Image (tube, rainbow, N blue to C red):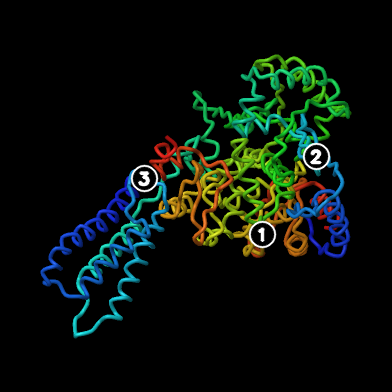
Amino acid sequence: MRSRKSCEQYLTPLISQIFHQLTITNICTAPPLAMSEPAVEDLQVINLDICPYGDMEIVLTTSTIDATYRVSSHQLCSGSQFFRAMLGPESSFSEANGLRRHQTSSSTTLDSTGSLFQITANEEHDPTALTTVLYVLHGRAKHIPESISFENLLDIAIICDYYDCGATMRPWSELWLNPLRSLASQPGYENWLFISWVFGDQDIFGQMTKRFSRYAVMVDGEFGVMVDGKVKRLDCHIPQRIIGTIMPKAEKEIC
Amino acid sequence: MADQRTKIGQDIVLTCRDILNKYDDSNTIMCNHRLKECDYVAFTGLRRGFRSENVLWDSDLHAHLALDNLIQTVEKVIKDVTNSIQTIRYGGYNCHDCYTLISQVVNDLRAKLEEITPLRLESFSREPVATDPRLTWNALLRVGDVSANPTVRLIRLDICKYGDMEIVLKTDAIHTTYLVSSHQLRTGSRVFRDLLSENSEFEENNRHRQSQTSASAPTVNISERYRLEIKENFDPTAFAVVLYIIHAGGKNLPETIPFKGLTAVAAVCEHYDCSAMLGPWYGKWSAQWRKKTEKFEYANWLLIAWAFGENRIFQTLAKKLSESGIVEDNEFLIVHNEVSGATSRLSKHIPQIIIGSFAYTM
């Protein structure tokens, strides 16, 4: 056994030096993504590396924003049924073939800035919400906001419904839903029905369906709900099966 | 639910119809002056009220109306009638039972509304909602157990189902194959980034690229996937945990993990420089062990604090261990019993740079 002596005075500067490196290189201090976007007049061009080493790009073009997200097809296929059907190895869609061709031709230049395979996202989707969904699909924890307002959560739910990846949002979705739970019983938050369905929250889904059994109406074949004596239509895509169960005679009315 | 709804609607309508029918009968009775005047007012009021508010709905046709509206309308009519009766409450007569009867029925129906069974999510979701059970630390590897050989467990874990490479980790008793995505590895870990990147000189990279070229045929042949062998002696479960998190697959990871597990995770993170990816998981897992940093059984906090940049804990521990620790053959031992000189060994994965700095100063 060697003799020991206190090494404190030697070690401390060393440690602080190492930790200095650690802070700079390892611990990313990037702030979580802000969910509120400033109103922008001009076309905003955004390039986001969701997965900096991904093999494809998603392009979202709206009237105000032109966003390009670099993503990994592996993660998209793992997390979303939509992408699995579109880009998966068994798929014969043109997108899957295009991706494969790109992979073959560019596999020798993995990091090249040359063109990547691109697909276009639905232009009706909210760019910030899409960003959040993609970050979650790629597990980029430090870029994912910890709290999201109800309106933004609705945008996210619409995208998750479209890409069929609501279940993949866990555990983040739980983190987002929990502070908003008390709103479910308040008027004005009828879209909770849709959100709880997308994210698979039985508690809220039960509450909302029960409430809808009393306040739901059909107006001109459209599903709505009575809020403070007025009919409020729900814009979201609530599956016909759910509407049918709440409103059995809906078809009869149309006939 | 729809049936319950229709039933309640029908009940309300039937009740109202009954009342009106009763009025029609009583109209004749009225002529015989056998009915008290306030009853007459009550019946007329109800009848007029129901007619003007159109309560007499056809339960088939109007089932799409808000049920609550119907009840509110009925209640409004009852209230109006009650008021009008109050004003003509002369001659010592009390109100007739008719509207109390209706009020009661409506109240009952209202209570029934509360009993409507909420819908179950399972019947409507596209995928079975089977909330993935959270696995315990020990069960994590069992998921992919494919071993037929009792001496060496063979485990296959699809961390990323559509991944493009495999990592093989061989320890004495367990051989684990992880299917992963090279994109995510490079995104999450600096070490993998260097290992697999374009301008990497490592042999691994060239082979990886070759396999990508050959595997890009429509159906990827499993045997053609690039395999990366890990030579370090990591805990297979901890390695799986880190890979799961890098691939955003944390939904069935445990909420708490044993201290040994946390140390093993820290070792993997330290080696692959990916502690930043752990994000919320680290906070969750470290919480219960945080109070015990000072105990000598938990001296491996040195590694954890190092890997996750817990500056304060690291400095406290380093100070403490520099007094009670010794370095022997490049391994760090702490003397936890001054009298007997008994020592315990710290994790093998504590970086040499730390051990070196201790050794240098001893």
Which one is nearer the viewer's eye here, B157 or B8? B8
Circle 2 residues within 10 Å: few <14, some 14–19, many ≥20: many
Instruction: Identify the disc placed on residue B2.
Output: 3
Which one is nearer the viewer's eye here, B171 or B101? B101
User: Label 2, on which residue?
Assistant: A67
Of tags 3 and 2, the one toward the viewer is: 3
Which one is nearer the viewer's eye here, A158 or A4? A158
Of tags 3 and 1, the one toward the viewer is: 3
**Element marked by disc 3:** helix
Do labels 3 and 2 touch, CB within 8 Å? no
Q: Residue at x 81, y 49 (%)?
A: A26
Do labels 3 and 1 touch, CB within 8 Å? no
**Element marked by disc 2:** strand
Amino acid, disc 2: Ala
User: Label 1, on which residue?
Assistant: B341
Q: Residue at x 23, y 84 (%)?
A: B90
**Residue B323 can be seen, yes or no:** no
Question: CA–CA distance between discs 3 and 1?
Answer: 77 Å
**Element marked by disc 1:** loop
